[in-house]
Amino acid sequence: MKNKKKVLETVIHGIFLILGLITVGCVLLISVYLVVSGIPAIREIGIIDFLFGKEWSSTSSDPEYGILPFILTSIYGTAGAILLGVPIGFLSAVYLAKIAPPKLKAVIGAAVSLLAGIPSVVYGLVGMLVLVPGIRMLFGIPDGASLLAAIVVLAVMILPSVIKVSMTALEAVPKEYEDASLALGATPVETYFRVSVPAAKSGIAAAVVLGIGRAIGEAMAVMMVSGNVANMPSIFQSVRFLTTAVASEMSYSSGLQRQALFSIALVLFLFILLINATLNFFLKRSKEK
Amino acid sequence: MQKKTISGKRKAYVALMRVLMFTSVFFTCALVLFLIVFVMVKGIPNVSWELLSTAPSYLSGRIGILPDILNTVYIVIATLLVVLPLGVGAAVYLTEYAKNKRVVSIIEYAAETLSGIPSIIYGLVGMLFFCQFLNLQTSLFAGALTLVIMNLPTVMRTTQESLKTVPQSYREGAFGLGAGRWRMIRTVVLPGCVDGIITGCILSVGRILGESAALLFTAGFAHALNGIFEGLASSGATLTVALYVYAKEQGEFGVAFAIAAILMVLTMLVNLTAAFVGWYFKKRRSI
């Protein structure tokens, strides 16, 4: 009887161990699949030609597979979104965490959560019908579907993550720091920006890095507003991101073209791993404090 | 008295920062308001009973989104049925069984990595692994399995958070009465983490509703009317994928906005439910 119970306990322990290791298995599965399916095309095209080639024409008779335009577009697009979205998100977070009365904070907090929950295709749809014609008229260019439209959409989409994570960091600043600053004669606003913000800087950095990860990984909304032409990035031109390069050709691709798409995904994955490592670094430092 | 001691430069700094903060918050709020109003105004007039209750038909030139609604329901059910045992089990392992700190940190690191991977990569690997390697073809079930991997970290984390709030003395009490570890988990720990499981469910539903990139290549975009088992085995578009197809490939903006309005309402419902559940369990706990 006792032995039977012991066996049962061991079996159940084993089952839970397997369940626990499934996440690790998933990460391995994704990495292995991306590497195995991404390497052949890079080998065939040559890593220099692939990463630094300026021409992508996968369907022409003499196909070129250079993804520099996609890499640069992803970097510029993300940088633009950060430049636009982070200041707004950061300043909103300071207001919400430090100044806003509790009721207003709850209402705006709910609004920010909603912003985070709206599906990316809805952003894409609104962008297509408001932003793209708006940019066309405002700047007098033939087509508003451009890097600029993508940057604005991405900036809006990273706003909730930036606000939420910065707020959490700012709220965790010990009240004694602020009290000391106030007692020394600093005004409240000076205290928030010169004491609370520096004390929460790791958390705020984590918010920015999280925003970078969101922006570089977004596919659908960007696909709907960026025009999706493989140009070198320029603010008023149609562009294609790493994510949209994969998404737009996958359904009809074959052979080397298909393999090249997997290689693009691999490059994107490496970017994400780098960003995740940075994020973990900042989160850890913010926790240690 | 105090005001006199502040120099003009400092006053200007404070004033500037105040203006910048108010502008930012105002902008954020205006943006949310604009999005809601715009989508509703453009979408609600296009929502009709016919749209909601029929399948699209080329013969009569009719567009209906009933299949997409059903597909969304099927995929939510299938995903939750698979992800809940996996996620809750992983969380139980981490908090109740794992003694090796190294193993715990590896699993947690893996979960963090998973939650940072963009959905397009999930879509790609899902297509390679579930659709091709496991030969599930482009089907809702393959899509659901892809979403399982995506939502695993969420369910795991929310369950883990609530497991941590189950007092250690409860566990010791169960052990003291002679319960084995499994019996203790079944009778003491799992009932105590219901709130975490429910929160994980709601967050996952929200994420599934909004997901499109991961489903495009795994679940496809057919609009056929099917029962649940037939539906899971065949290709089908969820509401978000249908929105994308109608807007981008067919230029049917009326239908796209109708779907957008429905999605917006669903998102609000999901958020409200999550807030309510959080509030309810917090209140119950504090008693």
Image: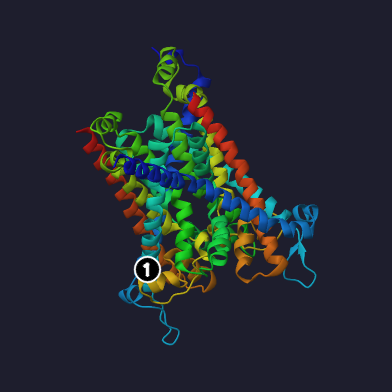
Residue A212 visible within the image? yes
Give SS at disc 1: helix
Residue A144, position as x, y percentages in the image: 60, 61
- At a point 42% along the width and 71% down the height, the residue shown is B255
Relative height, residue A136 to residue A22 (above, below): below
Residue B155 visible within the image? no
Q: B166 or A81: nearer the eye?
A: B166
For the N terminus of chain A, the image quarter is: top left
Q: A214 or A85: nearer the eye?
A: A214
- At a point 53% along the width and 55% down the height, the residue shown is B119
Relative height, residue A24 to residue A195 (above, below): below
Q: Is A26 displayed left or right of B93 in the figure? A: right
Q: Callout 1, which amino acid?
A: Ile
Q: Is A266 displayed left or right of B252 in the figure? A: right
Mark 1 Cα within 10 Å, few/some/many (few <14, many 20+)? many
Residue B257, position as x, y percentages in the image: 42, 66
Relative height, residue A53 to residue B256 (above, below): above
Q: Which residue lies furthest to the left in this view?
A: B287
- At a point 41% along the width and 86% down the height, the residue shown is B60
Residue A237, position as x, y percentages in the image: 67, 59
Residue A189, position as x, y percentages in the image: 44, 25
Q: A64 or A94: nearer the eye?
A: A64
- At a point 52% along the width and 30% down the height, the residue shown is A284
Query: Can you identify the residue that label 1 sits on?
Result: B69
